[in-house]
Image (spheres, grey):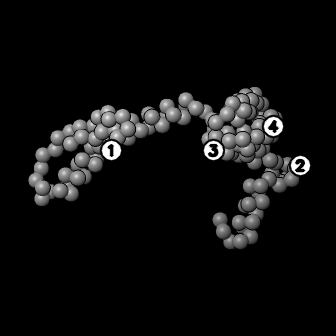
Amino acid sequence: MRLTDAITGTRLWADRFDGLIEDGFELQDKVAANVAGIIEPALQAAEITRSISRPTDGLTPYDLYLRAYAMLLSTAKLIPAALDLMEQAIARDPNYAPALAWAAICCYRLVLRRPERGSGGAPSQGHRFRTASAGSGRR
């Protein structure tokens, strides 16, 4: 049995299986498991290479992302500014995964920084959620 890349003609996998035709489903399972075990790591490697080689459709989203990332590494006070830059990158390339992921992290860190009631500030979003859950009988 052989598996060949239809575009390049390159042989991706080849193996020999012995069995009775009556055991067709068992033979099919063996072939599928063998092919999947060989192909899956190659697919992962190809996907990683593709992701690394082209970070985004343009330099502007990538540049915005890098500037925001540098801000996040410097101080927590710059999280709002970093989030703004991440949002600008996302506006230019809505599928740019690193900017989407780090924007989510910025939002999470901003929620964590909100003061709880009694600490001199407004109640945090988490406090509001716990209060609403307690009033509805949900925990």
Q: Is residue 97 left or right of residue 117?
A: left
Tag 1: Cα neighbours inside 10 Å, few (<14), some, or many (≥20)?
Answer: few
- Mark nearer the N terminus (3 vs 2): 3
Q: Nearer the viewer, residue 38 or 70?
A: 38
Which callout, 2 or 1, points at the residue further toward the start of the chain? 1
Tell me the quarter of the picture where residue 102 sits. Answer: top right
Q: Position of residue 76 (x, y in %)?
A: 77, 35
For marks 2 and 1, give the CA distance: 58 Å
Q: Which residue is mark 3?
A: 95
| Number of the label disc, if any, that sits on residue 120 | 2
At which x and y percent is residue 72? 73, 33
How far apart marks 3 and 2 lie (CA) works out to 40 Å
Amino acid type, residue under disc 2 in the picture: Gly
Q: Earlier in the sequence, mark 2 or mark 4?
A: 4
Nearer mark to the viewer, of 2 and 1: 1
In the image, which disc is placed on residue 36? 1
Q: Secondary structure at mark 3?
A: loop
Q: Which mark is residue 81?
A: 4
